[in-house]
Image: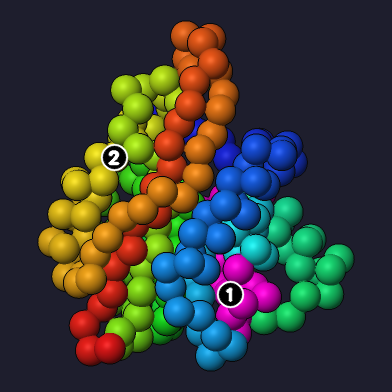
């Protein structure tokens, strides 16, 4: 059964998620060269927390998501703030298998563990990058299934960093590396307060 992100959208922007997006943006700033000529795709953008954190450092951000409810919140932020250079696209994951356009950087924050088969998606990312473009993907370190109180829609209990690096290489990326991005403290499924590590995985397409 799929998780209903539409219903969760209105209460999504809680302080831990806001801080996580800021921490991931900081890790991206440290590891990826950015400028006003950088066009970014945020896959699984949700309510735009990471997109909006990145926007001041780049030329434009396109956020795509399968949740109409999440994108409604994101679009309201764009309108209310009058921010330029940001747009959203609703993705039909069951029908669309490619990403239109070409981007210099593709980011994703805490979305990959909701994807059943990650390598095909990474290959889609590779095909949507300009020559020498980068991916910067943040997700959970392997955590044994404690992070989600409801495992519905969760296909991976995090990833080992070595496995993520290998998947990026299989998708065609070079200059692959992983690094610390953030740390989340929250009760596990068993109710015990735990620390969960968040990594950033970086790769580069050929031709740069």
Residue indicated by mark 1: 61
Which part of the image, by quadrant, shows the C terminus?
bottom left
Q: Which residues are magenta?
A: 54-69
Q: State the residue in front, 187 or 113.
A: 187
- Residue 33 location (% of width, % of height): 45, 79
Q: Residue at x 19, y 47 (%)?
A: 162
Quadrant in the rendering for residue 156? top left
Does residue 150 appear left or right of residue 51 in this picture? left
Which part of the image, by quadrant, shows the N terminus?
top left
From what the image shows, is residue 141 above or below residue 53?
above
Residue indicated by mark 2: 159
Query: Which badge, 2 or 1, is on the more N-terminal residue?
Result: 1
Give me the C-alpha separation between circle 2 and circle 1: 26 Å
Q: Secondary structure at mark 2?
A: loop
Q: Secondary structure at mark 1?
A: strand
- Residue 204 location (% of width, % of height): 28, 74
Quadrant in the rendering for residue 151? top left
Between disc 2 and disc 1, the foreground one is: 2
Residue 68 seen: no
Scheme of colours in the image: rainbow
Quadrant in the rendering for residue 45? bottom right
Q: State the residue in front, 138 or 79.
A: 138
Q: Residue at x 51, y 10 (%)?
A: 192
Number of on-image labels: 2
Does residue 114 appear left or right of residue 71 in this picture? left
């Amino acid at each position: 059964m799929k998780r209903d992100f539409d219903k969760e959208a209105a209460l999504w922007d809680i302080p831990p998620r806001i801080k996580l997006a800021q921490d991931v943006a900081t890790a991206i700033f440290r590891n990826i060269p950015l400028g006003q000529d950088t066009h970014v795709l945020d896959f699984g953008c949700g309510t735009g927390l990471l997109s909006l954190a990145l926007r001041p450092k780049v030329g434009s951000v396109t956020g795509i998501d399968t949740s109409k409810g999440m994108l409604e919140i994101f679009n309201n932020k764009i309108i209310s703030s009058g921010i330029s250079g940001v747009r959203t696209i609703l993705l039909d994951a069951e029908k669309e298998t490619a990403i239109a356009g070409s981007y210099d950087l593709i980011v994703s924050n805490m979305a990959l563990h909701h994807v059943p088969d990650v390598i095909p998606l990474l290959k889609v990312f590779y095909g949507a990058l300009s020559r020498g473009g980068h991916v910067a993907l943040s997700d959970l370190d392997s955590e044994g299934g404690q992070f989600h109180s409801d495992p519905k829609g969760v296909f991976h209990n995090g990833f080992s960093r070595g496995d993520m690096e290998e998947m990026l290489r299989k998708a065609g990326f070079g200059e692959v590396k992983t690094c610390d991005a953030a740390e989340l403290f929250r009760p596990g499924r068993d109710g015990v307060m735990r620390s969960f590590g968040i990594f950033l995985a970086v790769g580069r397409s050929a031709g740069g």
